Amino acid sequence: MLKRLNLYVVGWLLLHLIILRVLIDHEDEFPVIAGRYSLSYAGGLALIAAAGLIGAVVLARTQRIQLPRLLVRLRDQWWFLPAVFSASAALMLAVWMTPFQIFVTPVQKELLRGYATGAILTAAYVAVFWCGRDVVVPWAGWLVLGIGFGVAALVVTVHWLDRYPQLNQIDELHNWVVQWTFANTGLLGDALYRQMIPIPQPIYDSPHYILGLLLRFIGDTFWQARFARLLMACLALPFIYLVGQRMYGRRAALLAVVVAIFLLAPTAYVRPDVFVGVMLSVALYVYLRAQTTRRPWMHYLTGLTVALAGEGHPLAYRFGVAFTILYGLRWLYEMYRSRRLFIDGRIFALCLGGLTGMLIYLSIHIIPNFTQGLHFALNYSPISRTADQQVVLAQDIVLEQIAVWIRTSPFELMFVVAGVLFAIHTFNQGDRVLLALLAVSEVLMIATYGYYREFYQVHFLPVFALLAGRVLANLTTFGSNRIPAERLSNLALALVIFVVSLGIMVQNAQSSSEDTVRAEFTAIARRLKADLPRDKIIVGNENYFMEIRSLNYYGIQTVTTNQWFLVNYAGYKLWEVTRPDIFILTSEMDVPRYTDTVSIYQYMNDHHFQLARCYTETGLINARVYVREMPKGWTPDLVCHRYADQPGDAALLNWLRRWS
């Protein structure tokens, strides 16, 4: 016991030294203390240092400390527990929802908020439960907590579904257009060009087929497209529960599902990448089932489900490598333990399942047009980069991952990190599986990939949810095996954490809904839809497609990306084949990397296009409409107008203002 306490004291002091080291690298604009810090910041550092020293003393003298009599009497009052935890929730909401006034780095900001959160939870636990009586909570209490907050998070997600998360203009719109095209034409193509130009077999994720079919039945608007992807993401939830139940028990499994729902909201369902998280959840469940049998079928299914995750994104190959390493290490360990060499058929069954999944991928995406697949691989695999370039990209990937977490789910990140540390400490079978998936996948990504996107978070959905849910379920049982884990203290602390998570989620959803750029292009698109001839071929920014959904409207971006497609027609030849009648150019929004504006201007010049109108709503975006032939009733107007100001459009103008 003494050794364990000494270890906790050393760990506590080391943690505070690391925190202080990160925080001292700061300089205020108007320093007062030591020529670097303001009085408030220096006071905060002193408080953290004092907490480190006091906590070390308390940990070293835990057995000899007696509680004040006043605190003992207060604990007997029925109102004390709800009062303390209500105040704790209010303080944590203030910490996380109040704008930061100190100019610190993002890491320092999240570290300060995380430390304050830990201090508040520790103070609440000490005040109500430490060295006192704790009661066991029946399973019904955990069900009420989990189901209540899970449903509340889903309600918030669906309520702000059209606006939260904010629009990812390149990736999300591009993928939605692919699904919309399949829903309306049966062709899996990019921005409708597939129906006119023989683009080779595209490297598109197979979930587009499923989502496109679903849009035929529920509708094909932007909201319904997001809802379809959210439904697909929710398929992971029952498997996360089943995996958590086998690894850590039903209480941790229930909380893991709630954490997963909170992680879905920021970025998880904006692309078909959700399929990776779904299939990884299935693979984890099948893997755990396979450990209780020597039948090859379950191990084959493990490999197959991991390989099929690649249909959501090729980066899923990392999980296949991780599972192979797990099987290989177990094979080596069992040979060492038995002191004999033997062939383990389980790893061969796993590899055979993975090979089946790879053959499915190749037959859908590569074999129909090998040249296209090779073109894609050459541009996105590490063979297109030098070792020095990969080192620089690896650093960027690590930093971008931290930045993405800070932008999307910083509060949940704390508990994911705590879950990783807890898993390292206990290191049971479930911990080893999750840590292996995390470590191997991270190493492979920084060694082989070139960038990181927000929606890659969902690839790890079951891993993050299980790690965070497990640590939430064991907040006050760390290092204790004798006290029942289903204690009231665990439930109370989890309740506070979920209250804060829900509050942060609502605030983030409200801030995302106030998207001035999207409101601007939506208002412009509605005017364009009303004014432009419907029988003309129009090429414009994909953002306007949200309102001008038509088989005659072609997106201007991504089609001209030479890294993605090896197309039969590109640049000037592309416009010669499609023969657009109208171009809508929006320099404020078009991305040069994805838009071949040079060929567009050359084509317009050769075919005598003229600037007919310029649309705007608030002046934030100017949409210039170039036409081959002037539409009936139009006259050239080179000044950017709010065309809703025309006579007779007052009602529409008022409606647009209210909507914006």
Image (cartoon, grey):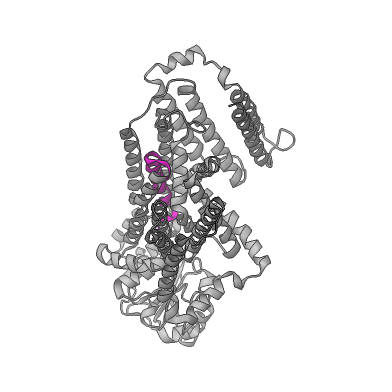
Residue 544 in the image, given as x and y percentages of width and height: 39, 67
Q: Is residue 617 visible?
A: no
Q: Give the quarter of the figure containing the N terminus.
A: top right
Residue 119 in the image, given as x and y percentages of width and height: 54, 31
Determine whether 196 is above or below 101 in the image.
below
Q: Residue at x 50, y 42 (%)?
A: 419
Would residue 435 be found to the left or right of residue 34 on screen? left
- Quarter where residue 19 is shown: top right
Report the front residue among 117 and 615: 117
Would residue 265 be counted in the magenta stretch? yes
Residue at the farthest left position: 217
Q: Residue at x 37, y 62 (%)?
A: 523
Report the front residue among 629 and 109: 109
Residue 655 in the image, given as x and y percentages of width and height: 31, 56
Residue 66 in the image, given as x and y percentages of width and height: 54, 15
Would residue 260 be counted in the magenta stretch? yes
Across the whole image, how many numbered discs are drawn on residues?
Answer: 0
- Quarter where residue 302 is shown: bottom left
- Quarter where residue 100 is shown: top right
Q: Residue at x 40, y 83 (%)?
A: 197
Determine whether 549 is above or below 23 in the image.
below
Would residue 563 be found to the left or right of residue 150 on screen? right
The majority secondary structure of the magenta stretch comes to: helix
Q: Is residue 81 visible?
A: yes
- Highlighted magenta segment, given as a residue range: 247-270
Residue at the farthest top position: 69
Q: Give the quarter of the figure containing the C terminus.
A: bottom left
Determine whether 434 is above or below 147 in the image.
below
Determine whether 129 is above or below 68 in the image.
below
